[in-house]
Amino acid sequence: MSINKDELYKKLADTVVNMEEEETVNICNKVISEELDAYEAIVNGLSVGMDQAGKLFDEEEYFVPELLLCSDAMYAGLEVLKPHLKAKNNKKKQKVIIGVVEGDTHDIGKNLVKIMLETAGFDIVDLGRDVSPSTFVEKAKEEKAKIIVISTLMTTTMEGMSEVIEILNKEKIREDFKVMIGGGPISQVYADKIGADGYSVNAAEAVKLAKRLVLA
Amino acid sequence: MKIKVIACEVMKEEMLQVQPLPDQEFEFVSMDYHLYPKKLGTELQDIIDRSVGYDRIILAFGLCGGAANGLKATNCALTIPRVHDCISVFLSSEEGCVCDFKKEVGTFYLSYGWMITEKSILSDHKRILERFGSKKAFRVLNRMYDGYKKVLFICTGYPSQDEVIVQSKEIASLLSCEHEIIEGKISFIEKIIRGPWDDINFINKAPLEIITEEDFGIH
């Protein structure tokens, strides 16, 4: 009897939401042994699970520790599936530079966006936290990134974001990159004011925004 | 002059030590909003809108993650300290200087009021420990807080703070941080309640004028 793919992917998503790392790995092994498509399992299983976890977080059902445990399960599954991705799924990934602005060490939000973008197929260069505006620009040039993603949780460090854009303007390379910003105090109004290409309210929206920006 | 003070629960105990002005009312807002500045903004606007019959509303808040951005009162004056958050309030002198956060990157601030929500670090840890064991619990906490080097407990002395200081030490040890106690001041809290609300330390808005993040120096 052939295995019901959709059911298996749903189960896989559930293990991520339920933080059952071992079970996630077991199901991913099954995906491989049943010769199912690894890419499909990522998109319809792991990624869906992370999305659901993100929703539970927004609804205040889950807190940050739960979200991190879900991402542990997701990453464990990803490790199993990655070597089996077929060449057609390995088209050149879009590169993203991500980091938290100088003066701020709050990186949970940044890490969640990083996880979601990674699951969605972007190639991430993580600069970590407390990153100076000039480092964002230098790294983006060096890595030939498409998108620069900047995060901050504190109002005292927000202006670091506009400094990144000012440097890009000064070096006349603003058009070479899309700039996305986010974090607790950030709003669309602020993004418009400093001339960023976009703002997103959470990690799931950040993925949608990133996809829109690289298509634009 | 009839005044309403809308204050964050974080400074409730300290506020209760200050002699209020005649004809002054207080409403305290739950600290649970701290993690959700946009929800806090909505809550504050709701409270302002249903507070009628006052000459002035004082918000005992800072910009608080952007929560104060966009607030306005329709029929009375609106006053808010020109600070980013309550850490500046607790550590300010009477003149109300804003702290130099750049020097304190990696400091986790706690105070009596802060423990209302930050005790959650202890319960978060317990929850993960029970289900996943100590190794995992340590790793998760480490990922959440490894930017911090120091837990700084701001002690204002109101009320007796021995128990929360013990808890703050537990947090420091869980996060592998050093622990320090600093004396906090309530002189700025007194000024928030009793004035004078000078334009250097406070943002003063006429009816229908909107508080913006620019008022706090963000450009």
Image: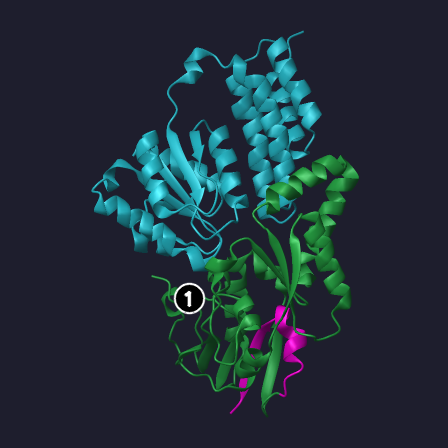
Chain colours: A cyan, B green
Q: Residues within 10 Å of mark 1 (few under 14, many from 20)?
A: some
For mark 1, name the chain.
B
Residue A139's quadrant in the figure? top left
Is A199 placed above or below A36 here? below
Q: Which residues are magenta?
A: B1-19
Side (left or right) of B14 relative to B92: right
**In what element is the residue under mark 1?**
loop
* Residue A56 appears in view: no
Magenta span includes A8 = no
| Image point (76%, 38%), residue name | B134
In the rendered image, the quadrant that contains the C terminus of chain A is top left
Vertical side of B122 occupied by A65: above or below: above
Q: Which image quarter is the N terminus of chain A in?
A: top right
Residue A135 on image: x %, y %: 36, 42
Farthest-out residue, top: A1
In the figure, residue B111 lies in which quadrant?
Answer: bottom right
Can the viewer see residue B57 in this picture?
yes
Residue A115, compared with residue B185, is above or below; it is: above
Residue at image coords 31%, 56%: A193
Q: Does B7 appear in magenta? A: yes
Indicate the position of residue B106 as horizontal and vertical percent values.
55, 53
Question: In this orientation, which residue lies closer to the viewer: B74 or A187?
Answer: A187
| Residue A42, position as x, y percentages in the image | 54, 23
Left/right placement of residue B90 relative to residue B141 reads: left
Q: Residue at x 52, y 25 (%)?
A: A43
**Residue identifier under label 1:** B70
- Circle 1: residue type: Gly
Q: Is residue A202 left or right of residue B16?
A: left
Provide residue A173's location: percent of width, then percent of height: 23, 39
